[in-house]
Image (cartoon, rainbow, N blue to C red):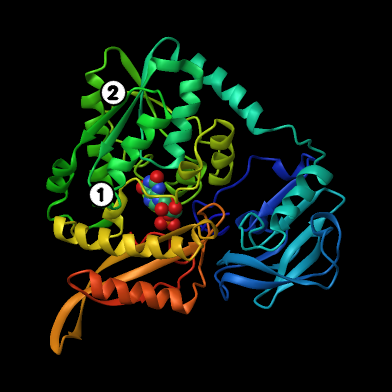
Amino acid sequence: GGPASVYGPDAPRGPEGLLETGLPTLGICYGMQYMAHELGGRVEEGACEDYGSAKLLIKENTDIFRHLASGSQIDCWMSRGDLVLDVPLGFVPAASTPNTPIAAMFDRERKLYAVQFHPEAAHTQGGAEMLVNFVFDICGCQANWTISSFIEDKVADIRRQVGDGRLVCGLSGGVDSAAAAALVYKAVGDQLTCIFVDHGLLRAGEGEEVARTFRRDFHIPLVHVDARERFLTRLQGVADPEAKRKIIGEEFIRVFEEEAAKIPNVKFLVQGTLYSDVIESGTSTAEGIKSHHNVGGLPEDMELELVEPLRDLFKDEVRKLAGELGLPDDIIWRQPFPGPGLAVRIIGEVTLAKLHILQQADKIVTDEIKAYGLARQIWQYFAVLSDTRTVGVQGDKRTYGHLVAIRAVRSEDAMTADWARLPHDLLDKMARRIVNEVDGVNRVVYDISSKPPSTIEWE
Ligand code: XMP
């Protein structure tokens, strides 16, 4: 997929002869338009776009749709601009949605398959099975990749890459960096030193908790750096989201380099970068959405070589890996937290006062969701401090206070997400507590946007 149009000047193209190899091929989204265009079908530019959830009508229960009944309707995730109007010779239309008359097309003879929607998105019902049908039945692949074989391969890769060099790893408290550290520790033992940079943009009490947990659960040497003032100073007066991300990313690595310089012979930096981070920061074909600070914001003069053993994994796989490596549940199930921390949840300039407000509001959201027993079912839940002020009345007095938003989403891999249908009594309790307990806040809203078109974080 991708936002390109087959008619654009830089439209991505497959290698010459790709569609004539006789190999099974599945085109998704732009891939379907590309296939139709290359093979003599008709693609219309920008006609009646189709975004978000759509009802997909299955014409026949064959091939990638073999687990679905003919004539059945399922929810699928659509995100397209252009539209395939006529299939190329040899293809049959295989599914449709109200806005996309040809939402799938198959040429069984040439083993060419294409879908306009996104089977890989969690919101496509039975989408994973479609991929399973393609990979196993049509391509004839075997499932011999397991987490333990992954660990074995990675341990060997890491040993090969680093030799007897020393490594540092940034721990954030989240499952990604913890799993990366544990995996590297398994490979090279105490060649690894973990560094926990407290940039002050963490949730309430989290800094102390991270240090405690890692000292207790791991026997890996851990350096705890209090860099709170340093980050706040650099963020002074900066309101642009990308500028904030870049500053935090750079500062983070600089602090690292300073700490790493104190350890003799450090050559490598371990990072828990996931595949979703790599995609969202823009691969050669996927468009950049935001610069995730463990990928896009690296300063060019960085002196350490990167070790990123989780680069090919999605979050669910990392959780399995973390379990296999023996990490405790509270780390495995900690909700994902962005590298730039609360800075991307404070709209506009980050100040100490705003940080305090957000930490208090966020703690209320977190505590209430946990108390309601929903923590495991919701991918992420947090508070956002907007830069909007609104008029309110408290104790018969006019107030002009901050607007806090609550965000709670369901997701499988952060690539797509839907807002969580939280019970009204829970929302009510969180909102009441926030306006009553957090000074300076007089209004709370609930964010009901899905991703796409929004993103999970506000910045
Ligand atoms: P968005 O906001 O892009 O977020 O929908 C997708 C997922 O990534 C997390 N996120 C980050 N993680 N460094 C990270 O390690 C970052 O800079 C970053 N920005 C966003 C976000 O919390 C969500 O889980």
Task: Quote the CA–CA distance across marks 1 and 2.
Answer: 25 Å
Return the x and y of residue 198 as percentages of the image width and height.
25, 40
What's the residue type where badge 1 is placed? Leu
The residue located at (56%, 72%) in the rendering is 49
State the residue position of label 2: 303
Q: Earlier in the sequence, mark 1 or mark 2?
A: 1
Q: Secondary structure at mark 2?
A: loop
State the residue position of label 1: 201
Return the x and y of residue 401 as percentages of the image width and height.
18, 76
Report crowding for label 1: few under 14, some 14 to 19, many 20 or more residues within 10 A (C-alpha): many
Q: Secondary structure at mark 1?
A: loop
Q: Quadrant of the N terminus?
A: bottom right
Which label number is shown at residue 376? Answer: none
The residue located at (45%, 49%) in the rendering is 280
Question: Residue lying furthest bottom in this view?
Answer: 396
Looking at the image, is mark 1 or mark 2 nearer the viewer?
A: 1
